[in-house]
Image (cartoon, helix red, strand yellow):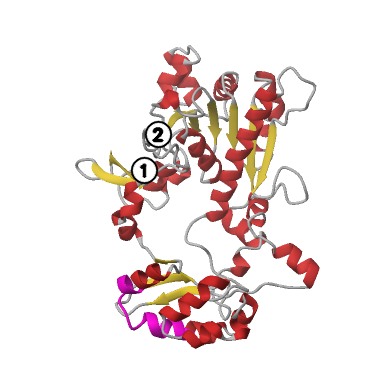
């Protein structure tokens, strides 16, 4: 039940578009927060049209905005601004990911929000943060992934840098934004009535969120002069760990790089002599001979179907797994056992709703995945109910705030 979830009773106002802030809103909504998503009139969040194969709302939007309400407000008008401030007065958290200065231009900057609600926690997501010489620049995840150091390490060494298949920079920033919101709420509650400061303005930059995931990239460079290079499916300094093709055309990832695991791995592939050579006893030595090791491993994987490769590795305790595409994930018994694919009847543009699976909720609570309550709503589906119910607006006030007045 929603009332039993960890964030039940928390209200979040999401002034987000695209992926980063909506990801934060989704995470908070998953665990019981009431998330009111404010969208522009007529078009709404642009993600409604991203990867839209049929119908009028993409599955990307339905996924990122699950468990939320959609309210249409025109933030460029006084009526829309007043409605936002009235909602802020009754909210615990505000999420936004507009270009820095946009909220201020609309009269909805931090000072205005805190005047409406001195206790509100404001989480701001932008390309480069709210301060610094690049703060004014717009930017999407692609730029942040490049400038944060990730793009340089993705792909094959003899080709230009590549990109991951999802907007990972946005998603990482969304995770930090949700974490920031929780920090703000925690401080607000635990420091109430004390002289200790409460940090209610949280600033998440996409490029910094990506940089924070780059492990020891910077200290390795400054300490040792190392500049890491693209190594394809490998991880620099770690071997053997790569993707390998099997006899039936399927692929597997095998992580046989642990020192104790490595010897067992070489036994499995029929190359025990490689498992006992002194210079291959540590990752440094194995990395120096990575091409030789990968050739030996793939000679073995190409001799067997994927299922048998994985069976033999599991018996030997060597970490490995199949490289999945969407159909594999949908059919996987582990994902299904933990309710990580949850089904809803959704409008996909056909004559009748279609049964569609969506990713489940992470983390699992007490052994049970939290049920997704609803997929991303239709544009403005909750405008009237929320403005009537929370703000006591008349129909005329709702129309003015939503920009749907007729002359």
- Residues under numbered marks 1 and 2 in contact, where contact means CB atoms less than 8 Å apart: yes
Dominant SS of magenta comes to helix
Badge 1 element:
loop
Q: Is residue 407 visible?
A: no
Q: Is residue 58 above or below residue 93?
A: below
Q: Position of residue 132 (x, y in %)?
A: 77, 48
Q: Quadrant of residue 109?
A: top right
Q: Position of residue 143 (x, y in %)?
A: 61, 58
Residue 396 among those drawn in magenta:
no
Mark 1–mark 2 distance (CA, rounded to whole Å): 9 Å
Local crowd at mark 2 within 10 Å, few (<14), some, or many (≥20)?
many
**Residue drawn where x is 55% and y is 34% of the image:** 15
The disc placed on residue 215 is: none
Q: Position of residue 291 (x, y in %)?
A: 54, 85
Q: Earlier in the sequence, mark 1 or mark 2?
A: 1
Badge 2 element:
loop
Give whichever of 314, 298 is nearer the camera: 314
Q: Residue furthest left?
A: 351
**Residue drawn where x is 61% and y is 44% of the image:** 176
Local crowd at mark 1 within 10 Å, few (<14), some, or many (≥20)?
many
Q: Which residue is mark 2?
A: 379
Q: Quadrant of residue 75?
A: top right
Q: Position of residue 260 (x, y in %)?
A: 54, 71
Give whichever of 403, 389 is nearer the camera: 389
Q: Where the C terminus falls, by quadrant?
A: top left
Q: Is residue 10 above or below residue 335?
A: above
Q: Is residue 168 visible?
A: yes
Q: Where the N terminus falls, by quadrant?
A: top left
Highlighted range, magenta: 295-309
Q: Which residue is mark 1?
A: 57
């Amino acid at each position: 039940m929603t009332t039993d979830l960890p964030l039940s009773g928390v209200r979040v106002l999401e002034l987000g578009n695209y992926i980063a802030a909506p990801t934060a809103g989704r995470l908070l909504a998953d665990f019981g927060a009431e998330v009111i998503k404010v969208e522009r009139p007529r078009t709404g969040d642009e993600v409604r049209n991203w990867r839209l194969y049929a119908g009028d709302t993409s599955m990307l939007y339905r996924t990122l905005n699950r468990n939320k309400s959609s309210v249409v407000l025109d933030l460029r008008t006084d009526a829309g601004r007043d409605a936002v401030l009235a909602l802020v007065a009754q909210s615990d958290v505000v999420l936004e990911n507009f270009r820095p200065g946009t909220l201020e231009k609309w009269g909805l900057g931090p000072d205005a929000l805190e005047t409406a609600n001195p206790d509100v926690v404001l989480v701001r997501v932008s390309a480069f943060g709210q301060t610094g010489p690049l703060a004014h620049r717009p930017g999407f995840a692609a730029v942040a992934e490049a400038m944060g150091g990730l793009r340089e390490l993705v792909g094959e060494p003899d080709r230009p840098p590549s990109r991951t298949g999802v907007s990972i920079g946005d998603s990482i920033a969304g995770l930090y934004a949700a974490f920031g919101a929780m920090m703000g709420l925690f401080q607000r509650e635990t420091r109430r009535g004390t002289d200790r400061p409460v940090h209610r303005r949280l600033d998440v930059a996409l490029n910094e969120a990506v940089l924070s995931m780059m492990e020891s990239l910077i200290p390795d460079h400054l300490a040792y002069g190392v500049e890491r290079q693209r190594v394809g499916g490998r991880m620099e300094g770690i071997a053997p760990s790569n993707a390998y093709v099997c006899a039936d055309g399927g692929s597997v990832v095998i992580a046989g790089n642990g020192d104790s695991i490595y010897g067992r791995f070489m036994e499995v592939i029929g190359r025990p002599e490689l498992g006992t050579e002194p210079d291959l006893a540590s990752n440094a030595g194995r990395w120096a001979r990575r091409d030789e090791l990968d050739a030996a491993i793939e000679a073995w994987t190409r001799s067997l179907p994927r299922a048998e490769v994985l069976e033999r590795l599991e018996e030997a305790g060597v970490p490995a797994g199949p490289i999945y595409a969407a159909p594999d994930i949908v059919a996987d018994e582990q994902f299904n056992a933990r309710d990580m694919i949850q089904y809803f009847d959704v409008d996909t543009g056909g004559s009748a709703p279609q049964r569609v699976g969506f990713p489940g909720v992470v983390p699992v609570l007490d052994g049970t995945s939290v049920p997704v309550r609803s997929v991303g709503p239709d544009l403005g589906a909750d405008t009237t109910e929320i403005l009537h119910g929370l703000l006591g607006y008349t129909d005329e006030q709702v129309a003015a705030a939503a920009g749907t007045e007729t002359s």
